[in-house]
Image (tube, rainbow, N blue to C red):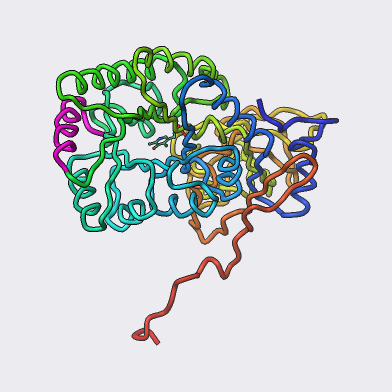
Amino acid sequence: MHHFEYRNAELYAEDVPVKAIADAVGTPFYLYSHATLARHFNEFSDAFRGMDRLVCYSAKANTNLAILSLFSKMGGGLDIVSGGELYRGLAAGIPASRIVYSGVGKRIDEIDYALKEGILMFNVESIEELRLLNERAGTLGKTAPIALRVNPDVDPKTHPYISTGLEKNKFGIDVEGAVEGYRLAKTLSHVQVRGIDCHIGSQITEATPFQDALKSLVALVEKLRDAAGIDFEYIDVGGGLGIIYGDESPPLPEEYARAIVDALKGTSLKLILEPGRVIVGNAGILVTRVLYRKKGKAKEFVIVDAGMNDLIRPSLYHAYHGVQPVVKARRNKVTADVVGPICESGDFLAADREMADLKSGELVAVMSAGAYGFVMASNYCSRLRVAEVMVKGDRFHVVRERETYADLMRGESIPPFLT
Ligand SMILES: *Cc1c(COP(=O)(O)O)cnc(C)c1O
């Protein structure tokens, strides 16, 4: 459910015509719906009602300050994967005590920053990281709260680039290694064991992989308690719940919650959740304008002003995004590639798509672009990163300005030996 709907053949974001925003801010731009964001956050959190839980929204799906600030006001925590995300989270008003920190490659400066701020826990991904955390905490006169990220070796049946819980993936520590890791953690004087964690992948559209992963985690929790006397407070089940881009049928938050709550029966662990895509994915669209139409010998092209540098998911994962006219009219269908201005043949937003026969100058909405959209944008080809806009009811606000040419060269300089 989202709030991008047609009224009289014109696409609206809540109560604002998308065209009006395009007229005001130019194209391309990302457009987020406040009502959809809030609704998805609540739906997800409410699915776990009755449980002691903390919804740590996974920042990397969309780190815009306005979005982080909204979830902060709604009582959310944050799942971060870098010092930069910690900085943004704190700036958005999320208390450090509601922030968990995942990632295989935390740097010393990032670890120190998080220790000084006093985050809820580090989701530790290797034994070396565990030892470093102990050392840094000792140096800073702090205690490092930790969970080990366990790699349960389950297949999330998603795109290989976003599978993270398989033996061959770089993430987490295998189950046997985790037992050793917890034993070691107990002996480290500047480390406090606070929980256990896993995250098996993204855009997962079945409940079974989550159940399998949790089964393995709960067995490990029991083993740690019974065989090693190691107990803790939190179980962090990660994120990864998929959304509908096209014809997927992922579990609803209610079904997902039931699977998780069932798997945790009998434990008294507090639950941490790290949803990203499921909250923001369908709460955003990318609005772009058709620049040219062109018919090749083999294909028909709709050339738009947004490219793979603005939304890389189609190029990177062959991901599907719906493509819709902002103003519907009686028109023919074509089968075309929707492509951007970038000098790469991999620069497409839709391939071989049967779609409305849009003419140059018309506006196009690329749907389901709220997650892993703007955050993965780059300045490739010295293209300006686009504006981001949030709409609430009949109001809208630019929550990130379009970059300028001056922004492109910020921090660059010509060395004296070239002058
Ligand atoms: C990316 C990520 C998430 C969020 O994944 P979604 O598929 O967007 O829900 C959660 N936890 C960790 C550790 C991640 O890296």
* Left or right of residue 191: residue 287: right
Question: Is residue 177 part of the magenta span, yes or no?
Answer: yes
Q: Which of the pair 373/75 is nearer the observer? A: 75
* Quadrant in the rendering for residue 281: top right
The part of the chain drawn in magenta is: 172-188
* Left or right of residue 98: residue 155: left
Q: Which of the pair 224/283 is nearer the observer? A: 224
Q: Ligand 1 appears in which quadrant? A: top left
* Left or right of residue 63: residue 194: left
Query: Does 103 appear above or below 4?
Result: below
Query: Does 401 appear above or below 18?
Result: below
Looking at this view, name the residue that lies furthest to the right: 8
Query: Does 381 appear above or below 277?
Result: below
Question: Is residue 47 part of the magenta span, yes or no?
Answer: no
Q: Which of the pair 324/2 is nearer the observer? A: 2
Counting every numbered tag in the picture gives 0
Figure quadrant of the C terminus: bottom left
For image coordinates 33% across by 16% down, the residue present is: 212
For image coordinates 39% across by 53% down, the residue present is: 117
* Left or right of residue 323: residue 223: left
Q: Residue 37 appears at what percent x and percent y?
A: 62, 35
For image coordinates 44% across by 33% down, the residue present is: 274
Majority secondary structure of magenta residues: helix
Residue 294 in sight? no
Residue 141 in sight? yes
Q: Residue 141 appears at what percent x and percent y?
A: 25, 56
Figure quadrant of the N terminus: top right
Q: Residue 51 appears at what percent x and percent y?
A: 47, 21
Q: Residue 135 appears at what percent x and percent y?
A: 19, 52
Q: Which of the pair 106/17 is nearer the observer? A: 106
